[in-house]
Amino acid sequence: MASTSLLESINDPADLRRRTRAELKHLADELRECVLQNVARTGGHLSSNLGTVELTIALHTVFNTPYDRLVWDVGHQTYPHKILTGRRARMPTLRQLGGMSGFPRRDESEYDTFGTAHSSTSISAALGMALAARQKGEDRKAVAIIGDGALTAGMAFEALNNAGVERDARLLVVLNDNDMSISPPVGALNRYLAQLMSGRFYTAARQVGKSVLGGVPPLLELAKRLEQQAKGMVVPATLFETFGFNYIGPIDGHDLDSLIPTLENIRERMAQREGPQFLHVVTRKGQGYKLAEADPVAYHGPGKFDPAVGLVTPATPPRQTFTQVFGQWLCDMAEHDTRLVGITPAMREGSGLVEFARRFPQRYHDVGIAEQHAVTFAAGLACEGLKPVVAIYSTFLQRAYDQLIHDVAIQNLPVVFALDRAGIVGADGATHAGNYDIAYLRCIPNVSIACPADERECRQLLSTAFEQEHPVAVRYPRGAGVGAQPLAGLDGLPFGKGELRRQGTRVAILAFGTLLYPALQAAERLDATVVNMRWAKPLDAELLARVAATHEALVTVEEGAVMGGAGSAVGEALAAAGTARPLLQLGLPDRFIEHGDPARLLALEDLDAGGIERAIRRRFEALVGAAPELHAVGKRA
């Protein structure tokens, strides 16, 4: 039998249900190897997927999917799920333009019952599905699979609180406890889960069992096999039972001999409407691949690599990323100003706070996956005279919008928001895109928005933001810029002021952020003026008025949503000043941008140098001349 023949025979979960337990165990090995080899070729999430192989097999074996609903929280652990539900052949296209998403998507498969990517939504969605089935008179069951990191978010507890009173809901919550989110776990809940597994009461009960059964070896062996299932029985009044759930566990999430019978028993309880069920399984991130087991953080989302060798340091050091520029600035400013406090909602590595956490542990706060709390926590610190810096992805700040307005902006508190992953993010796709921050921030009174064009400006504008006594967001993209070396000092740039970067004729391009550089390239062919605006709010009204008075048409360029974005701000400012000038707004359109290579995605939206030039020539042909022969590489047909 070929090494992958068993996996190749699985075209959908119905094929799993015809296999023996021994075959399923062999299948787990093949499935894990399939995940490893494919992620190594394309890049993607690895540790989390290696840890959910057996759990995925067990869920699809026991439940009648897709009639029964599986909702995967976050969804970056669903590669085994995708492989077992008819998408094995598409794995080489994972996270590629036009290929398979790295997250569940309803438009990709009927087995992807709910689109996820942001944390802690699964219980709410699964409860909605369970109650919809009840209302429609259907006997389907709903299962939410959520990690211990995601369970720290308030939304998860809101859903648990609601679900606990729905006694006839056919709902199961599976806690995938791997003692890990993306960054190491934090908070009281993590300590509580650890106590469930190692508390004095359980340990004492286990020792009593050993002493009683020690003289009867067969019974002692049976007790050992039942030990994982018995843990939940000897932990008194667990947190989840107080929410109204029937708690079972913890059990070994890599042991199909434990998982499948336990899930079968739970399925029968759900059929009898014995209340919402809660299964606590313990898994290990990186399971089965020693390098990932040893360093699950490094292998959380690796790029391409050789599985036989593992991750290696490149011979040529990569260019400094914006995230690294921020991390260095944070440490430098913390040394300079003892009021600085750094905050992250469970993204220490991704947001560049590792060194800050090491050097300033008393001023570093990882609040868990709790964006709402992070923002209001920062507001409380600011009320007491500290200077909080919230390091957060643009897409995740969306989750704390009310707190941003109600707790920070209305009180005009000096909180700095370091918005990483602004604009297109690439392989993670629409769920992680930072396309909307300019639009959703600039409408809030008291909030300012800085848009650095390169690494040097990023450091300088962070310093400018920190100097202010009101809320300021500094937005910067994922990855590296043009390679502008940051200056060593902490001097800022003038607040609310832009700069003229190229003097041309007739048409002026107003660039916001890193698209300044493709705008400069386009301007060379157009003989256009280029302005580095730097601030989406406040606009440099004086500079704008001067440019508008000396040019016949204006173009705005931004890596963000056109609707309500920086271009809209320019249009509003011109209208308020009574200045009538043709205005072309270039940016991201009113649709979600799919996953793919960021440079290719920008080209598809006419936001590379060639695209900017073409767009300007189409609109202002009389001013800049007709387009010469241009290569529309990457353009849609």
Image (tube, rainbow, N blue to C red):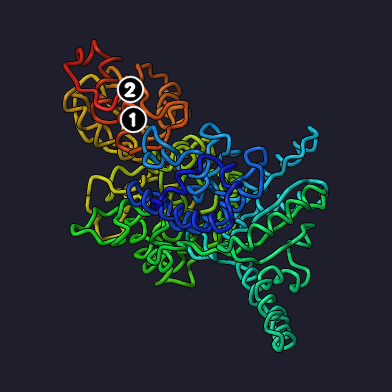
Q: Is residue 288 left or right of residue 384?
A: left
Nearer the camera: disc 1 or disc 2: 2
Earlier sequence position, callout 1 versus callout 2: 1
Residue beneath disc 1: 557
The quadrant of the image that shows the C terminus is top left
Is any part of residue 434 visible from this angle? no
Residue ID at (75%, 74%): 234
Residue 212 percent across, percent down from the top left: 75, 87
Of the numbered discs in the image, which one, if any, rests on residue 124? none
Which amino acid type is marked by label 1? Val
Q: Identify the secondary structure beneath mark 1.
A: strand
The quadrant holding residue 567 is top left
Of the numbered discs in the image, which one, if any, rests on residue 636? 2
Residue ID at (45%, 44%): 8
Q: Is residue 614 left or right of residue 419?
A: left
Is any part of residue 576 visible from this angle? yes
Residue that sits furthest to the top in the current view: 622
Which amino acid type is marked by label 2? Arg
Residue 527 percent across, percent down from the top left: 17, 23
Residue 575 percent across, percent down from the top left: 44, 21
